[in-house]
Image (tube, rainbow, N blue to C red):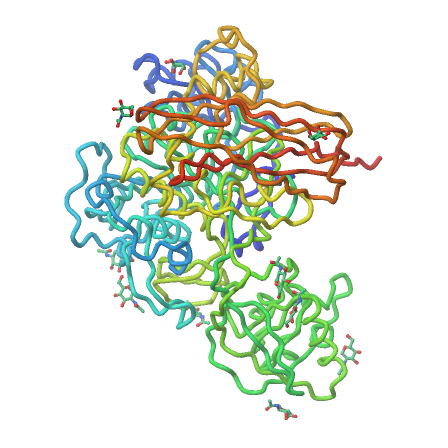
């Protein structure tokens, strides 16, 4: 299960260092969001009304003024105030209040990647591209970065209603058309995360030599002529209060796509997931929100982006992998992972962690928790933990050889000559370090090599199934998120290590944070050709044209690693058919799936009453471009998926259906595989935007626990292939509890 309430830097290195925040006790006043749903009446969304509500609960004393923090009211209604638990409960019962919840802290979670996706010289609709505005809710940007240069780009589109209010010394241009910040003094990026993600989506092409010569080439975004609006909501940390404020503004300012590489909400309740709430209001206004899936893989069920109106992105590898090598004194060469730009140092003395520690009885010297600076000075130290790198820096070692505890084959920027080895390689070097009387090593500069296995789901990428809404496929889609080169703020520290004073304009990061803007950029690309498409149509186009991926990690169906597959930019603009979903469908879905009217109001702010929807709406009836069903072990089943497609391809066309063979997570007898059919098996269209419905039936016998199957329905007219995964997943056994 995903950890709750922890900050996620969805770029991985910071996750290693992330602090854990503990909650405080009940009578203390803490920031709460008083969420009041959609704006029905302007006067009710004014701060004067909010203050009146607040006074009626906590009195007119000075406490009221000090307790009130801010109002929302541009795109939805609500305010923020410091409240005790009791006051929050009382406010929740007041007229017009939908829910009250404590503000939580969220985690912030080349470019060869586009070339790898076959997107070298894409067909462009320049006029359309100039009209698309991506809103980035992140840590701000570095406005002087070459990626945000507006050369050749005219004034913002007419529809833009935002402002450039980035604070002191933050200037906008025709590319960066808007900026707002919520806690610090400017929208200037102080982390690098926001600059990296935004430039991945919309950066103009810049030729770079990579990170000190590693992985150089052209860095660019998907839509180099599109506009960026910056909502800096993560400085110093990202909280619900700021994230919701950013959504409130971005929606009202008129962005087309929102990219948000953050997460970390309490999976148990959609009603307090501020990203799901903000994205709901965006969806109602025709704005697609793209979110990173999370970095909690390979844990099954760890995906943190679960709402069906969100577009949730998993991370994959590209064919460029960065590796490093170390040469042992005995001539052996051992390869491992790091982004190490330091030129080969000479043959240096190697010392094992246990032999380099001062007395530290309670800590494990093998992981270098207590290195003695006198013993490691001028030497390379070997440590059985990734964090040994930081300990080596602190102790003044010349370099470090560490264990890649996560065994994830991902390289990170290191602050000194260092390499992370897998377990086998680590032991090999350890044996040498311990047995040799005078061990020496040389750590080489890292190089980029071709990875013939790509794309593979990154091990860190959060996995489905969706524990909250098990019949909604999550993640939805996969995109490059490992070792991505993009712009960054030139301020140190580059490797999250205090004292690492290197100054660069481009850097390499990994995480689902990096995958997310690839999809947001692609959504903008699709929008540049189809400005009137709904968020669900854009999402469907990207999902049904994705490149099929077949890898699984042996625990869950492959779709729970990579959704519909790897994005395919060239095809995404010509999907043929799309599966559309509208607000009323989401409301029916919520009502039909265990949410009562009050909860549905809590999520959507829509006053709709569930009893209005007469027929029972099963999750299989939501017109999602993927079909997932969770069954109980050893119970035969018949499932029907009701779907409707809209023709956006060729007016007169006939689509024939086809199923791919079921693939199975665990080996089963073939007789146990389910059967699947579709009625009607052929769809004939006479017009554009014509809709046709069909029903997919999956029939299965008794299947044991811990199994899963997946297949796919493909509609094809000979030109377009419209592919939707079908996943039958056997309910996860309850998590064993120890008494
Ligand atoms: C980094 O970008 C700045 C402009 O923002 C430029 O002046 C500087 O030369 C660049 N540095 C490198 C190493 O390219
Ligand atoms: C604005 O910020 C940039 C980047 O930190 C800096 O180089 C420049 O001197 C600043 N200008 C002013 C007027 O503060
Ligand atoms: C490194 O130095 C050691 C000890 O001086 C020596 O035995 C070894 O051959 C050297 N290795 C290389 C690769 O230079
Ligand atoms: C571990 O690393 C070595 C290279 O040093 C490589 O040959 C081996 O295949 C790796 N093993 C695994 C399980 O990744
Ligand atoms: C280094 O530590 C290992 C055990 O970790 C021990 O066997 C070896 O004797 C030590 N070497 C020295 C030089 O102390
Ligand atoms: C890491 O690379 C090795 C090959 O060196 C491969 O066998 C292994 O599956 C990879 N692990 C992951 C998690 O990608
Ligand atoms: C980095 O800069 C700080 C502040 O200027 C300085 O104290 C520190 O020694 C520098 N570190 C290195 C490794 O150069
Ligand atoms: C609630 O949703 C329905 C269905 O989309 C819509 O017609 C109605 O306008 C919404 N009401 C509000 C207050 O947003
Ligand atoms: C589609 O085909 C029908 C029958 O052949 C024809 O009447 C109609 O004009 C065609 N529509 C388009 C848009 O080509
Ligand atoms: C699937 O269909 C085949 C052939 O009609 C049949 O023999 C088999 O029993 C069916 N399997 C299930 C699980 O219904």
Q: 564 or 221, which is in the foreground?
A: 564
**Visible in this render: residue 52?**
yes
Residue at 34% in and 41% down: 573
Which x, y percent locates residue 148? 26, 53
Q: 470 or 167, which is in the foreground?
A: 470
Q: 703 or 526, which is in the foreground?
A: 703
Total numbered labels placed on residues in the image: 0
Q: Measured along the vertical axis of the image, is residue 518 above or below residue 499?
A: above
Location of the N terminus (image quadrant) = top right
Which x, y percent locates residue 406? 64, 58
Quadrant of residue 638 within the rendered picture: top right
Residue at 70% in and 31% down: 731
Residue at 40% in and 25% down: 684
Which x, y percent locates residue 393? 56, 70
Asked whether, in this view, residue 656 is left or right of residue 637, the answer is left
Residue reaching furthest right? 739
Q: 597 or 652, which is in the foreground?
A: 652
Which x, y percent locates residue 32? 49, 27
Image quarter where ligand 2 lies: bottom left
Q: Measured along the vertical axis of the image, is residue 712 above or below residue 69?
A: below
**Visible in this render: residue 242?**
no
Location of the C terminus (image quadrant) = top right
Q: Measured along the vertical axis of the image, is residue 369 above or below residue 686?
A: below
């Amino acid at each position: 299960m995903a950890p709750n309430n922890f900050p996620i830097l969805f770029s991985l290195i910071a996750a290693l260092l992330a602090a854990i925040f503990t909650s405080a006790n009940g009578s203390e006043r803490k920031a709460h969001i008083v969420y009041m749903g959609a704006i029905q009446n302007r006067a009710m969304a004014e701060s004067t009304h909010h203050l009146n509500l607040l006074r009626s609960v906590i009195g007119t004393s000075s406490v009221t003024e000090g307790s009130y923090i801010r109002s929302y009211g541009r795109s939805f209604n609500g305010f923020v105030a410091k409240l005790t638990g009791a006051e929050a409960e009382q406010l929740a019962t007041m007229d017009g209040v939908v829910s009250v919840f404590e503000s939580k802290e969220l985690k912030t979670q080349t470019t060869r990647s586009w070339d790898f996706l076959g997107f070298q010289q894409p067909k462009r609709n320049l006029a359309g591209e100039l009209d698309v505005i991506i809103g980035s809710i992140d840590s701000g940007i570095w406005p002087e970065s070459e990626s945000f240069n507006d050369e050749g780009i005219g004034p913002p589109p007419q529809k833009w209603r935002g402002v450039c209010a980035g604070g002191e010394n933050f200037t906008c241009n025709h590319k960066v058309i808007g900026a707002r910040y919520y806690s610090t003094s400017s929208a200037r990026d102080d982390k690098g995360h926001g600059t990296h993600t935004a430039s991945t989506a919309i950066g103009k092409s810049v030729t770079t030599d990579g990170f000190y010569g590693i992985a150089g080439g052209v860095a660019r975004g998907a839509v180099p002529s599109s506009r960026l609006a910056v909502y800096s909501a993560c400085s110093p940390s990202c909280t619900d209060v700021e994230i919701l404020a950013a959504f409130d503004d971005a929606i009202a300012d008129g962005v087309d796509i929102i990219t948000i590489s953050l997460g970390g909400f309490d999976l148990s309740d959609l009603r307090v997931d501020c990203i799901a709430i903000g994205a709901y209001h965006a969806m109602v206004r025709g704005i697609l929100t793209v979110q990173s899936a999370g970095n909690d893989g390979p844990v099954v069920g760890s995906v943190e982006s679960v709402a069906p109106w969100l577009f949730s992105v998993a991370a994959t590898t590209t064919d460029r992998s960065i590796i490093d090598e170390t040469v042992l004194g005995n001539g052996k060469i051992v390869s491992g992972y790091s982004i190490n730009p330091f030129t080969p140092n000479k043959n240096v003395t190697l010392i094992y962690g246990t032999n380099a520690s001062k007395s530290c009885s309670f800590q494990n010297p093998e992981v270098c928790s207590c290195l003695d600076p006198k013993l490691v000075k001028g030497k390379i130290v070997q440590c059985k933990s990734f964090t040994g790198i930081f300990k080596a820096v602190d102790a003044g070692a010349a370099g470090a050889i560490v264990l890649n505890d996560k065994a994830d084959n991902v390289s990170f920027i290191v602050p000194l000559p260092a390499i992370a080895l897998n377990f086998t390689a680590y032991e090999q070097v350890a044996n040498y370090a311990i047995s040799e009387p005078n061990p020496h090593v040389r750590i080489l500069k890292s190089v980029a090599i071709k990875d013939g296995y790509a794309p593979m789901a990154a091990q860190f990428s959060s996995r489905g199934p969706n524990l909250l809404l098990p019949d909604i496929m999550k993640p939805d889609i996969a995109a490059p998120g490992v070792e991505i080169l993009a712009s960054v703020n030139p301020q140190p520290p580059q490797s999250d290590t205090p004292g690492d004073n290197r100054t660069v304009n481009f850097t390499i990061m990994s995480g689902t944070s990096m995958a997310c803007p690839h999809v947001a950029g692609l959504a903008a690309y699709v929008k540049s050709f189809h400005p009137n498409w709904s968020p669900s149509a854009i999402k469907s186009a990207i999902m049904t044209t994705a490149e099929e991926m077949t890898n699984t990690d042996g625990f869950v169906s492959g779709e729970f690693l990579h959704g519909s597959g790897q994005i395919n930019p060239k095809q995404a603009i010509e999907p043929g058919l799309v599966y559309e979903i509208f607000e009323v469908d989401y409301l029916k879905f919520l009502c039909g799936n265990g949410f009562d009217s009050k909860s549905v109001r809590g999520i959507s702010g829509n006053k709709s009453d569930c009893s209005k929807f007469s027929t029972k709406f099963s999750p299989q009836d939501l017109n999602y471009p993927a079909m997932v069903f969770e069954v109980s072990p050893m119970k035969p089943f018949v499932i029907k998926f009701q779907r409707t497609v809209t023709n956006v391809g060729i007016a007169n066309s006939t689509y024939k259906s086809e199923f791919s063979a079921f693939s199975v997570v665990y080996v089963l007898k073939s007789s146990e595989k389910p059967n699947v059919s579709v009625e009607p098996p052929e769809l004939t269209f006479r017009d554009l935007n014509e809709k046709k419905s069909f029903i997919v039936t999956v029939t299965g016998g008794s299947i044991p626990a811990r199994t899963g199957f997946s297949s796919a329905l493909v509609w094809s007219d000979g030109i377009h292939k419209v592919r939707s995964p079908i996943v039958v997943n056997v309910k996860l056994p309850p998590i064993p509890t120890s008494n």
